Image (spheres, rainbow, N blue to C red):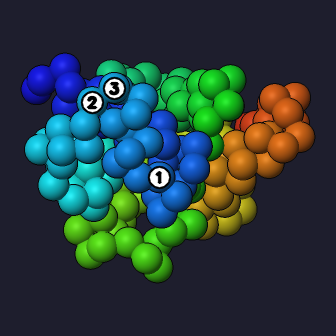
Amino acid sequence: MSDTKEEILRLGELLIRDKGYNAFSYQDISGKLSIKNAAVHYHFPKKSMLAAQVLRDTRVKFDELMEDHRQATATEKLRAFFDIYKSSSEEHKICLVGAMITDYNTLDEQVSQELKLVMDEILTAVKNILKEGRNSGAFFFKEKPRTKALLIITNMIAALQVARVTGQEDYNKIEQAVIEGLTNP
């Protein structure tokens, strides 16, 4: 993949996280890269194609993370999952999925399908981590694993958004409360 295409993807993701999908334009990308809009259109003729690729790349990165931790304990896997959000928080970014969900009703079919795939993959992974953790005695929760996974994911998405306004310390407190809610019987 060309360096320009990689930079377009990187900036596209950052702009979605910063402004939201509907609020950025190719001019935002071309201006930051000092290239013409036509160069952005060359690589991604439509903005929906760019967003779909960003989501596919996110899925690949998430799959790689889960594969890297395949032999880890449930606690280590969950920590790796939380580290995604922790890193975003420290970089003052909101969750890509959370940013895209706010624009869900206006997304092209291609983008909404990619978003569903990312969400399904994350939900399945967290649900499986929770099942494994409960079976090993590392986690305690009364909800069904899918429900608990949804609670955790939505808490983390919201924590990033709230911390944008209230600060890193509040993100840390929310994350810690979620973890304690799983590990204290």
| Residue occupying the point 58% across, 43% down | 18
Residue type, label 2: Ile
Residue 143 x %, y %: 67, 65
- The answer for how far apart the CA atoms under marks 2 and 1 are is 16 Å
Q: Are marks 1 and 3 in contact (CB under 8 Å)?
A: no
Q: Closest to the observer: 125 or 174?
A: 174
Residue with the mark numbered 3? 34
| Mark sitting earlier along the chain (1/3) | 1
Residue type, label 3: Ser
Q: Residues within 10 Å of mark 1 (few under 14, many from 20)?
A: some
| Residue occupying the point 80% across, 48% down | 162
Asked if residue 58 can be seen in this view, the reply is no
| Mark sitting earlier along the chain (2/1) | 1
Q: Closest to the observer: 93 or 2?
A: 2
Describe the element under mark 2 as helix, strand or loop. Answer: loop
Residue with the mark numbered 2? 35
Q: Residues within 10 Å of mark 2 (few under 14, many from 20)?
A: few
Residue with the mark numbered 1? 24
Q: Are marks 2 and 3 in contact (CB under 8 Å)?
A: yes
State which quarter of the image contains the C terminus.
Answer: top right
Up-down relation of residue 150 to residue 132 (above or below): below
